[in-house]
Amino acid sequence: MAIRKITEYPENVLATPGETVSEFDVELENLCADMFETMYDAEGVGLAAQQIGLSLRLFVMDCEGVKLVATNPEIVKTEGEQTGQEGCLSVGKVPAVVVRAERATLRAQDLKGEWFQRSAEGYAARCFQHETDHCDGKLFIDHLPKMRREMVVKKFQKEKKLK
Ligand code: NI
């Protein structure tokens, strides 16, 4: 296992829809082990392949008791609305308020390629939506009005310079 380097905004891979995962082998298992290790090291609750520079439809998460690997994820059902703060390891965890569905059902394949569905609410549902967005080449700041998006990016770039 190894901690991978986290890809940061505005790297291209973050804005590119990932490719479908079709091999469910030991290589994928090892990759996911690295992704969990990288996510825990960065104190995140979710990490998509794009965030370690790989253009794949794949994410891992461990958020409010929902721990899973999702390959080829899609959100198949949403209900309600929640307004809350959200951040991203690829944007320096600078927080912003994002409106998301309160409940979401994720459909994805596990490490063996078996399809499953999982429903969640609150923060875990937010994580489903945020990570599935990554797989589609979308960042949480893409949900923000232009002014607020620019504020988040400026803050991120400023904090990065200070490091
Ligand atoms: Ni993110």
Image (cartoon, grey):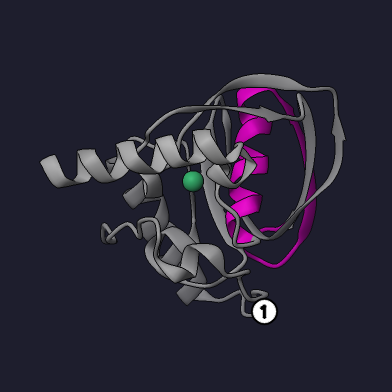
- Classify residue 6 by image quadrant: bottom left
Q: Is residue 116 magenta?
A: yes
x, y percentage for residue 8? 35, 56
- Say what secondary structure mark 1 lies in: loop
Which residue appears at 58% of the width and 55% of the height? Answer: 134
59 versus 82 height, above or below: below
Amino acid at the residue labelled 1:
Ser
42 versus 8 height, above or below: above
x, y percentage for residue 44? 40, 37
Q: What span is colored magenta in the figure?
A: 109-135
Q: Is residue 19 left or right of residue 53?
A: right
**Quadrant showing the C terminus:** top left
Q: Is residue 146 left or right of residue 89?
A: right
x, y percentage for residue 112? 66, 66
Which residue appears at 64% of the width and 41% of the height? Answer: 143
Q: Is residue 120 visible?
A: yes
Residue ID for mark 1: 22
- Classify residue 67 by image quadrant: top right
Which residue appears at 40% of the width and 69% of the height? Answer: 53
Residue in front for this viewpoint, 70 or 142: 142
Q: Is residue 36 left or right of residue 80?
A: left
